[in-house]
């Protein structure tokens, strides 16, 4: 038997689930998805906020931790670590079969540390040790302060999922930080073949902002700009993949590859369709190719299984992708401004979710205690 996920796997792309919830693990739903070809899990504060507050899955644990005198931050971390460990255990068979190339679960560092290199390093090391699984990654935002943290963490053997990537320039810095970290790991006698990392390049949010700017300029009726609607995000990702291949197929990585180092795979995040006028699998179908990952939320994953077509598309029409971004710049839509805004918005939203999650954990714990 085959399906769109397994067909995509054969083209060199892993499909991960961008969601986690305790009930999904306990009910066997996650195992079912793994049997269909899903080979990883990603999470963030927003996902955990919806899981913990939007279900009764965690109520007993909330009561127990409150009874032990744990505060909301300790409680959240305990819940998240338990879930990520459980998901990693279910994915362990995939990790073992792939010799460590796949089968990872990711947990994000406190988003308030995004602009503090040393605090990010310390937090990521602590979480990686607490998770205590070989097939976990710690998510670090691709801020100017987060990128040197990636260098340090890879150099000390911590698996890293670099998140909130929008800019091609920031992505270049992340690739180089990964390779520099591998150099340090090799110099210290560590096994570079055991290091793992993905670079999470966000997709659909780019179209949300760029399309808005096109429409603000009357793009719906403008023959020059209207054809560019819904094109920026995929173009940006295709150029990111081109740059990935240039670096990891080049001389800089050749020596590390000989030592057994793995490439830092691009991971396509934010691949759900925000605009209802676009097809529900537009982004996943456009970004399939070797040495990549696509992490999909539940609805996008279900749509891809039902109607997705698997074909190598990531390195098609790259010249056209470059032309798209050139035309946007010529029209006065500055991609550097777009990606800077998206990074700032992403950091703000994760921090707000994190803060809201802690506040609501405290409130929900109190309400549960009163009702028992």
Image (cartoon, grey):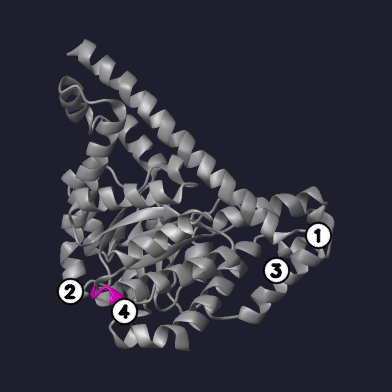
Residue 20 position (above or below residue 39): above
Q: Is residue 210 left or right of residue 198?
A: right
Please tell me which of labels 3 and 4 falls first in the chain: 4
Please tell me which of labels 1 and 2 falls first in the chain: 2
Residue 325: assigned label: 3
From mark 2 to mark 3, how far is it between C-alphas? 40 Å
Name the residue carrying label 2: 97
Q: Marks 4 and 2: in contact by CB < 8 Å? A: no
Point out the frontmost of discs 3 and 4: 4
Q: Is residue 294 visible?
A: no
Which span of residues is magenta-colored? 186-190
> Residue drawn 33% across and 79% down?
10
Residue 332: assigned label: 1
Name the residue carrying label 4: 261
From mark 2 to mark 4, how far is it between C-alphas? 18 Å
- Most foreground residue, 31 or 341: 341
- Most foreground residue, 72 or 104: 72
Q: How many marks?
A: 4
- Most foreground residue, 268 or 37: 268
From mark 3 to mark 4, how far is it between C-alphas? 33 Å
Please tell me which of labels 2 and 4 falls first in the chain: 2
Residue 61 position (above or below residue 362): below
Local crowd size for mark 3, using a 10 Å CA cut-off: few (<14), some (14–19), many (≥20): many
Point out the frontmost of discs 4 and 1: 4
Residue 132: assigned label: none
> Residue drawn 20% across and 22% down?
66
Q: Is residue 21 left or right of residue 114?
A: left
């Amino acid at each position: 038997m085959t399906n769109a996920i397994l067909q995509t796997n054969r083209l060199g792309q892993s499909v991960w689930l961008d969601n986690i919830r305790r009930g999904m693990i306990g009910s066997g739903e996650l195992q079912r998805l793994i049997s269909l070809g899903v080979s990883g899990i990603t999470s963030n504060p927003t996902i955990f906020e919806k899981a913990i507050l939007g279900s009764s899955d965690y109520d007993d644990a909330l009561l127990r931790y409150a009874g032990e005198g744990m505060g909301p931050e300790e409680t959240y971390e305990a819940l998240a670590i338990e879930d990520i460990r459980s998901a990693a255990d279910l994915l362990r068979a995939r990790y073992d079969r792939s010799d460590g190339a796949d089968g990872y679960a990711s947990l994000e560092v406190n988003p308030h540390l995004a602009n503090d290199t040393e605090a990010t390093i310390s937090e990521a090391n602590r979480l990686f040790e607490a998770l205590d699984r070989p097939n976990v990654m710690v998510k670090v935002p691709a801020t100017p302060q987060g990128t040197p943290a990636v260098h340090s963490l890879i150099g000390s053997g911590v698996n890293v999922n670099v998140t909130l990537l929008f800019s091609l320039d920031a992505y270049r810095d992340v690739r180089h930080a990964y390779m520099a970290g591998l150099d340090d790991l090799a110099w210290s006698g560590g096994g570079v073949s055991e290091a793992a990392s993905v670079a999470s390049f966000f997709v659909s949010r780019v179209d949300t902002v760029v399309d808005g700017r096109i429409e603000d300029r009357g793009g719906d009726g403008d023959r020059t700009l209207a054809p560019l609607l819904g094109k920026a995000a995929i173009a940006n990702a295709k150029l990111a993949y081109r740059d990935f291949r240039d670096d990891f197929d080049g001389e800089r990585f050749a020596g590390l590859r000989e030592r057994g180092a793995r490439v830092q795979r691009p991971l396509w995040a934010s691949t759900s369709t925000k605009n209802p006028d676009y097809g529900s699998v537009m982004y996943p179908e456009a970004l399939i190719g070797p040495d990549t990952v696509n992490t999909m939320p539940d609805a996008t994953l279900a749509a891809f299984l039902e109607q997705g077509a698997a074909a190598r598309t990531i390195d098609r029409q790259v010249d056209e992708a470059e032309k798209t971004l050139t035309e946007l710049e010529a029209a006065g839509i500055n991609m550097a401004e777009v990606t800077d805004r998206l990074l700032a918005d992403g950091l703000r939203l994760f921090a707000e979710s994190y803060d809201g999650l802690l506040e609501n954990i405290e409130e929900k714990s109190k309400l549960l205690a009163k009702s028992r």
